[in-house]
Amino acid sequence: MSTDRVRIFDTTLRDGEQSPGASMNTEEKLEIARQLVRLGVDVIEAGFPISSPGDFESVVRIGAEIGDACVVCALSRAIPKDIEAAAEALAAAKRPRIHTGIGVSESHLRDKLRISRDEALERAVAAVKLARTFTEDVEFYAEDAGRADPEFLYRMAQDVIRAGATVVNIPDTTGYAYPEDFGSLIGGLMEHVDGIEDVTVSVHCHNDLGLATANSLAGVKAGARQIECTVNGLGERAGNTALEEVVMALKQRPDVFGAETGINTREIVRTSRLVSSITGIVVQPNKAIVGANAFAHSSGIHQDGVLKERTTYEIIDPADVGAGGSSIVLTARSGRHALRHRLEELGFEMAEDEFERIYADFLALADKKKEVYDEDLEALVGERERTIGETYHLQELHVMCGEPGVPTATVQIVDRDGNVLVDSSHGTGPVDALYKAINRLIDVENDLIEFSVQSVTRGIDALGEVTIRVRAGDGRVFTGRGAHSDIIVASARAYMNALNRLLVAASTDIHEEL
């Protein structure tokens, strides 16, 4: 079987960010974009410039920094001002792409857009022609194609190709399709649309029925040569096609798909962990490829087989996705060289002064634990990164609680100007008292809607990590994370992280869902 190249279009920074609580600032998006380049993606969809000043700036800065390492794409609706904003944001990009489109299903035409099919065709063609005045690389998305009349979809694809589209994106926006159905849809395009062989057919599948990966692969078998996906499967509702799943499926089964990607698979786990750390969305342990249990075996039969020959129960070598372990055991007796070596193996590079701060944190943790694991180190680095650029910094806290007694918390916070703020409060428990005290000092409307605590590693002395979500007065949701050996301190850090993100958030985003 001959092997074709399938391009990987990563939309973690655009569609993935639309996951509730997954909003990222520009610096965080840049950090992920740099890692996506190391991963080897072909296209980075950097944002939706018209939606907010923050999205606009992210596209500008990513386009300027990435250079010609990959294509940098900006989303727009089939609206002139959207396309113009996308073009302006991409002005410094070496390989810019404008991604524009319109709904094609009867539901979208009738209920959302309230236009006829002919009007939709006119808008689509006009959008592609306008985008072509700014760049030669124009991708057109036919929103909700999974529920569209195939004949109308063929006609739409034909018209936008004639107008100059270089990529035609077929999204299953609602996750409605199943593999045979979606594969037939792509196959119909390949058969009935003149010139389709001269453009790239892309698939963008959502996971509402858990079929995003299967549908994307069915699209590849039918002729699609670009998959739009996100790291860890982030995205609206149930998420998008998971990058790690389709990439490894294509790599493991060339006999079925006859296609390959340019992804450096050894960077997959590192990328997954970075995105999880920045967004605050924890990867479920049994998640394919990148979950904590993806290469773990508890069954005695499985253990026996793996010990004799790994491939009896593992079709993927953990090293192939960057999930290999380490033989270095870090304790309080480990020196700077051992710590720096392990941090570098985990992909962390830092200046000497930042390393010294991490080393101090490491020693403090190692004094409380018998052994410091990789996950502990990742949590320490993440905790340091979360304090950069804070509006308010938690300096001290003291909590009193017990039975009988009234839980009471006192907090000391320093603002950006160096002013020290101190207050106390009581509550139903230590965390409630703590959060009330913080709210007395930081007067910003919010509701705590989710609170979770998990052990970063095993053992009674494990580092605790708290993840919370707060809803702002305008309805937006912000995630905060904090890690510490004391879960009360971790709870305070998580809340401060969420409030700081709320305070510096850009204007309300306008999301155009594919």
Image: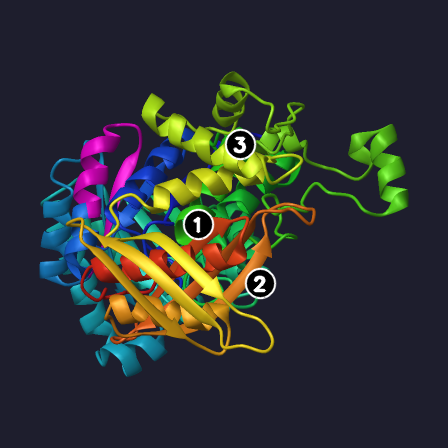
- Dot 1 crowding, Cα within 10 Å, few <14, some 14–19, many 20+: many
The answer to which of 448 and 282 lies nearer the viewer is: 448
**Alpha-carbon span between mark 3 and mark 1:** 15 Å
Residue 292, compared with residue 428, is above or below; it is above
| Residue at disc 2, secondary structure | loop
Q: Amino acid at mark 1?
A: Cys
Residue 258 shows in the view: no
Front position in the image: 460 or 38: 460
Say left or right for 95 vs 284: left
Mark 3: secondary structure: helix
Q: Nearer the viewer, residue 48 or 281?
A: 281
Determine whether 257 is above or below 52 in the image.
above
Residue depicted at x 35% and y 21%: 352
Asked which secondary structure carries label 1, the reply is strand
Asked if residue 305 can be seen in this view, the reply is: yes
Res 72 → quadrant: top left
Left/right of residue 275 with respect to residue 332 in the rendered view: left
**What is the magenta range?**
58-77
Percent across and percent down for residue 182 are 51, 60
**Residue 405 percent coordinates (x, y):** 54, 77
**In the rendered view, does 91 fall on the left or right side of 475?**
left
Discs 1, 2 touching: Cβ within 8 Å: no
Question: Circle 2: is it few (<14), some (14-19), or many (20+) Cα within 10 Å?
Answer: some
Question: Is 489 inside the magenta-drawn segment?
Answer: no
Q: Residue at x 85, y 39 (%)?
A: 303
Query: Which residue in the structure is indicated by mark 1?
Result: 229
Label 2 sits on residue? 210
Residue 412's tag is none
Q: Quadrant of the C terminus?
A: bottom left
Label annotation for residue 265: 3
**Distance (Cα) linking label 1 and label 2:** 14 Å
